[in-house]
Image (tube, helix red, strand yellow):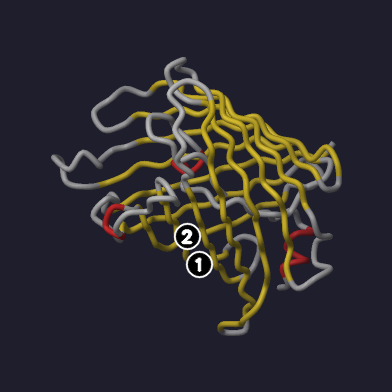
Amino acid sequence: MKAKNIERLGFTVSLFGPLAAGSAGVADELKVRYPIVDYREFELEHNGVTTFDTAKSGKSNDQFYTIEWGAGVLPFWFVELEHELAAPTAANITYEATTTENYFQLTPTGKYWGDLTFFAEYSQPAHKADAKSFTFGPLGQTEFGEIAGYSALHTINLLFTREVGNNSTNATPFFGAWQSRLLINSYFQPGFEYYGMIDDLGAPGKWADQQHRIGPVLVGLQNFAPYGKFKYELGYQFGLTQATARGAIRWRLEYEIPF
């Protein structure tokens, strides 16, 4: 099944945000952002991440959750309001930030070899001592290759963050994500994902000090037309460096309603 046909069913994909220390961000979601704008659709979305490691590592049971409200207000523009909650190891869940996200689709869906979107985000922290942040960068998607007769869809996110305001730094964090999956049908699309985080591109440090993850993912959609669509994603990430938790489970639940 071709990607453009999947998109006609409303099957979309999404990715990342701030990596600034001391504040939660989209990067903590381990979410891939997709470049296709769903025009005239209202979206309710929940994302969650929980990490796993040894008890004394300080990297186990980190939790991050979001609740997002979004709408495709123009054929090329999708806007979201996001509420972020987090619970570092051995801490209670607290409200971390309110974020606005914008997707500006630069190419018509399926017209060229790939689809390209510019992502821009502003995050307002709940704690006055934390810095505000802007995150921006390209989201790309293309379909190529075939395994067992099924096409493969590939998505990439390349996002950069800058802080402003209280306790801001001159660092430029980077968050990258890659997802490849087989388009078996709209209900069942297995694949794999990679996530990479660098605290400052100007001083990236050693590989061991960066966060890199890779693992399997399962994506699917149930269409309840004309009442909307339910989408899910479920993945497990294996840490590749000393700075990364050994494991992380992530999930995404989304309901879209046309208007």
Q: Quadrant of the N terminus?
A: bottom right
Residue 98: x and y in percent read 57, 24
Query: Is 74 placed left or right of 38 in the picture?
Result: right
Residue found at x 80% / y 70%? 112
Residue found at x 51% / y 57%? 177
Which residue type carries mark 2?
A: Val
Picture quadrant of residue 154? bottom right
In this picture, is 203 found above or below 83?
A: below
- Furthest toward the top, the residue is 128
Picture quadrant of residue 100? top right
Query: Which label's residue is closer to the chain start, 1 or 2?
Result: 1
Query: Is 195 placed left or right of 246 in the picture?
Result: right
Residue 110: x and y in percent read 80, 67
- Furthest toward the left, the residue is 56
- Contact (CB < 8 A) between labels 1 and 2? yes
Query: Is 40 placed left or right of 235 in the picture?
Result: right
Count of all numbered marks drawn on residues in the image: 2
| Label 1 crowd bin: few (<14), some (14–19), many (20+), radius 10 Å | some
Residue found at x 26% / y 33%? 89
Picture quadrant of residue 4? bottom right
- Residue that numbered label 1 is attached to: 191
Mark 1 → mark 2, Cα distance in angstroms: 5 Å
Which residue type carries mark 1?
A: Gly
The circle drawn on residue 217 is 2
Residue 214: x and y in percent read 39, 62
In this picture, is 198 found above or below 110?
A: above
